Amino acid sequence: MNHLLGMLLSQDTLPRTRVVVAALLSGLSGVLVLGIVNKAAAEIAGTGLAQVDWALAAAFAAGIALYAGVEVFAVSRLCAALENAIHQVRTGLLDRLVRADYEQVERVGHTVFYESITQATREISQNSQFIALALRSAVLVVVILAYIAFVSLTAFALVGLTIGLGGLLYHRAGRRRDDGFARMMDEERRLFESLDDLLGGFKEVRISSARSRDLAATFSRFSLAATDVRVDVQGHVVRQFILGQIAVYLMLAVVVFVIPQYVPGFRDQVVQITAAVLFMSGDLGALIQYLPLLAESEQAAARIARLEATLAAMAEDEGAAPSAAASVPAAFGEIAFCGVTYAYPAPEGEAAFVLGPLDLTLRAGEIVFITGGNGAGKSTLIKLLTGLYRPKCGTIRIDGVTVGPRLRHALRDRIATVFSTYHLFPRLYGAAPFTAAEAETMLSWLEMERVAGLTGDRFSRLDLSAGQRKRLALMAALLERRPLLVLDEWAADQDPAFRRKFYREILPTLKAEGRTIVAVTHDDSYFDVADRRFHLEEGRLVERGRDAGEEP
Ligand SMILES: Nc1ncnc2c1ncn2[C@@H]1O[C@H](COP(=O)(O)OP(=O)(O)OP(=O)(O)O)[C@@H](O)[C@H]1O
């Protein structure tokens, strides 16, 4: 339970001393109730009359009231601390994720993050009250064992031995269940991925019955495998539960059959110890029920801890956040690539794609076009320029200063982008301050005023055509007011009239406002709009002319 307890104890909001005192008081109140019942039973046995001892009845009621009060306090505080721990873990993971190195996140893929951040935290949250109840049952078992020791040390040794042996067998049975849990998680992840495929490619699935049949068959195979593992795990859980129950019955058998053989004068204590064991068996039963849930939560906590470690290893090497000064967008004179190369890891048995060495200087206020065939390396170059990828060799310099780890933030803070695979956020997260009039002017410049609007910083709608969505993405990028605008095949989805407006009016206006524009394009009829054009071919960059239609 290391990870789970670690999460719980990391909480500053958990009033540890008060919770421990409450848990102990809860145990003691249980023993008080037990002691009162035993005393009343002894009185009845002594007098042979079932007379009500009002003093004992009042003490019994006080014991129950104390038990209920401290119990509610301890369990609710533990639950609150766990929920708080989950909140902190979730926000901590997201915080690390947004600061993680792009290249590594791209390589790992999204599913693992999604699964751990949502599913694993939900699992712990669902079981939080059982975690608290299990802790309180454990305390009660310990306190009642102490009571048994107080009554008879030999009875304590024999009951303790039975619980110890039962616990050991129960724990061993739990290991197979834990392995099953891990397999179950893997199977469910595969199921999740194929569901992602189904929903992501829903159009393609609906259009082809062969594809939908194939996908449904794959999904069904994964689902069956997940079901098999789940059934196997449930079998282990049931076996473990029954084993636990048998251990409890054995403990009762020890009290009734074994202890009388070894404890002289046991007759006097038999009622007390039997009552104590019966009292304790309720909590042992609860523990047997809750421990598998605890194990499940522990596995979820371990997965979260692994993800935290992965994200810590993925943190960009500067570790520290950018300084305030470094993150302020500032004008620049030039950005120079000096002997920059980049290579993806080589697929097995194939040569790696290598971009560069690149020598290129982007001057402030220029429009630069990047052209090249599919797979030539244009998007890779854009990721290097935007600081998402780090050069394998060579340096990138802003006004002569090498863009090292800390300055990479500054470089990014000077750039607004619309990537070829962009995400249109429903809100203008991080936009520079703007007025409603400015937003309206920009919407009508992009010919979107009759289609969409802005309510505060939120787009009124996103259910738009591909070209319209891209115009909103451009609007979001422009509202960031960054000096360098990087566009990857932005005009590809635009109709001819707006494409013309984009090249002949929008880009020149942005340039006149002092922005630098780097655009990946295939639109050879507008090459003349650029101040310079660079052509990529199999990762090598050469400067080309700006004449319309001039292709290699
Ligand atoms: N994440 C990746 N991992 C490994 N190789 C990659 C990755 N992304 C791209 N590549 C490879 O790098 C090369 C250049 O890809 P890139 O996306 O930069 O081309 P591009 O010029 O933008 O092409 P397109 O015009 O088709 O978008 C390709 O050969 C591609 O297979």
Image: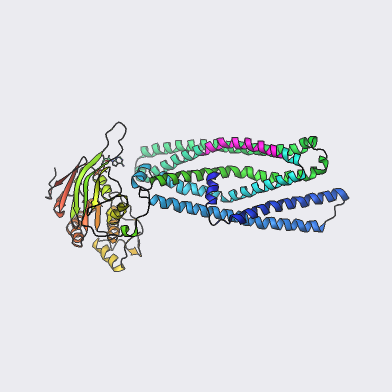
Give percent across and percent down for residue 111.
41, 44
Decide which of 475, 100 is in the foreground and name it. Answer: 100
Residue at x-position 27% and y-position 61%: 481
Give percent across and percent down for residue 162.
69, 37
Question: Residue 72's image quarter?
Answer: bottom right
- Ligand 1, seen in the image, is in the quarter at top left
- Specify the quadrant that holds the C terminus: top left
Q: Is residue 217 above or below residue 405?
A: above
Q: Is residue 246 above or below residue 118?
A: above
Decide which of 520, 390 is in the foreground and name it. Answer: 390
The colour style of the image is: rainbow
Residue positioned most to the front = 401
Question: Residue 19's image quarter?
Answer: bottom right
Figure disc tally: 0
Give percent across and percent down for residue 534.
17, 47
User: In the displayed structure, does residue 182 sit left or right of residue 332?
Assistant: right
Residue at x-position 45% and y-position 48%: 117
Can residue 267 be seen by looking at this rendering? yes
User: Is residue 4 shown in magenta?
Assistant: no
Can residue 489 be seen by looking at this rendering? no
Instruction: Determine the main secondary structure of the stretch shown in magenta.
Output: helix
Give, as a single range, the part of the protein colored magenta. Answer: 158-181
User: In the displayed structure, does residue 278 sit left or right of residue 134?
Assistant: right
Q: Is residue 351 above or below residue 415?
A: above
- Specify the quadrant that holds the N terminus: top right
Residue positioned most to the top = 349
Question: Residue 468's image quarter?
Answer: bottom left
Decide which of 547, 259 is in the foreground and name it. Answer: 259
Give percent across and percent down for residue 373.
20, 42
User: In the displayed structure, does residue 454 sit left or right of residue 523?
Assistant: right
User: Is residue 163 shown in magenta?
Assistant: yes
